[in-house]
Amino acid sequence: PETEVVAGLGIAALQRLKARRLTVADLGTGSGAIALSVAVEVPRAEVMATDISTPALELLRANLAGIGMAGSRVTTSEGRWFDALPVSRRGDFDLIISNPPYIGRSEVLDSSVTDWEPTEALFADDDGLRDVSILISEARDWLRPGGTLVLEIGTAQGSATLDLAGRAGYSKPSIERDLSGHDRALLATWSAEFPPEIEVASLVERLRRGETLVTPTDTVAGVIADANNPEAVQAVLDVKQRPGTAPLPVFVAHIDQARTL
């Protein structure tokens, strides 16, 4: 029932989009429950279902027969997380969805779960957040602007997962609850408008070293550098192929900085 809620969140996100063709990646697909549900419910969706387990993918392929023609829009690939996706599809996905391992190594599960699921599909390091963290961080490179990330999580992981998504730069991430009222899924949109907070310090340090960077400024992408570093300013002029007499715009954080300049 918990994963059914997760699949429903992904389906709803796709149904809100107007594009005639939608691309989906179900990472760590297992038996294919999420991938096949999406294919059936969203006829516009092309679904890539991946798993590191060969037996899991064999089971998925057997289950494809049960959904008829919708199965023709599902492809499979073996590999760990994003390693299973073709590089040519980077930045192309409208939805990345996953039910990853999220149980901490020290937690004890009922036999009704452990008897039917392989250990590697249940448990993860870092109190169960290791794979969740990887998916949140790397999905940014594979989602198109406005694309959605949906992850199943543990009931005690809502706050930590929300913090990870916020620091990674997702737009208004939220934690959705399951039918029992427990935190169950991360729902996040990738806007790609600003660099993630976690990277800002690195970018600032690069500017201070005199490097030039390409970044969104006001309405277009521009080449930027530290205005107080003459060599960096000259580097911008060189990149733009402008003479040293040509004025460059200077962005300031507040009026006092403008007055100082």
Image: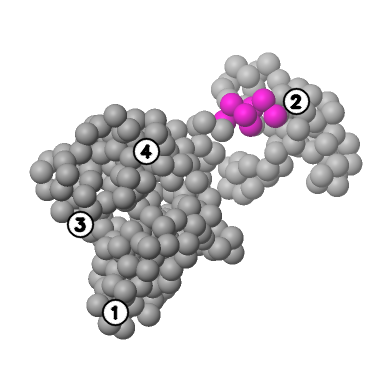
**Earlier along the polypeptide chain: callout 2 or callout 1?**
1
In the image, the segment drawn in magenta is: 200-206
Q: Quadrant of residue 108?
A: top left
**CB-based contact (under 8 Å), mark 2 and mark 4:** no
| Relative depth, front residue between 240 and 98 | 98
Residue 209 is labelled as 2
Q: Label 4: which residue?
A: 124
Of marks 1 and 3, which one's residue comes earlier in the chain? 3
Question: What crowding class fits label 2: few (fewer than 14 Cα within 10 Å), some (14-19), or many (20 or more)?
Answer: few
Q: CA–CA distance between discs 1 and 3?
A: 20 Å
Query: Magenta stretch containing residue 204, yes or no?
Result: yes
**Spatial distance from mark 4 to mark 1, Cα to Cα?**
32 Å
3D distance between C-alphas at marks 2 and 4: 39 Å
- Residue ID for mark 1: 65
User: Callout 1, which amino acid?
Assistant: Ala
Q: Which residue is mark 3?
A: 4
Front position in the image: 219 or 226? 226
Which residue is rendered at x = 79% and y = 24% of the image? 229
Choose mark 1 or mark 3, whichever is in front. Answer: 1
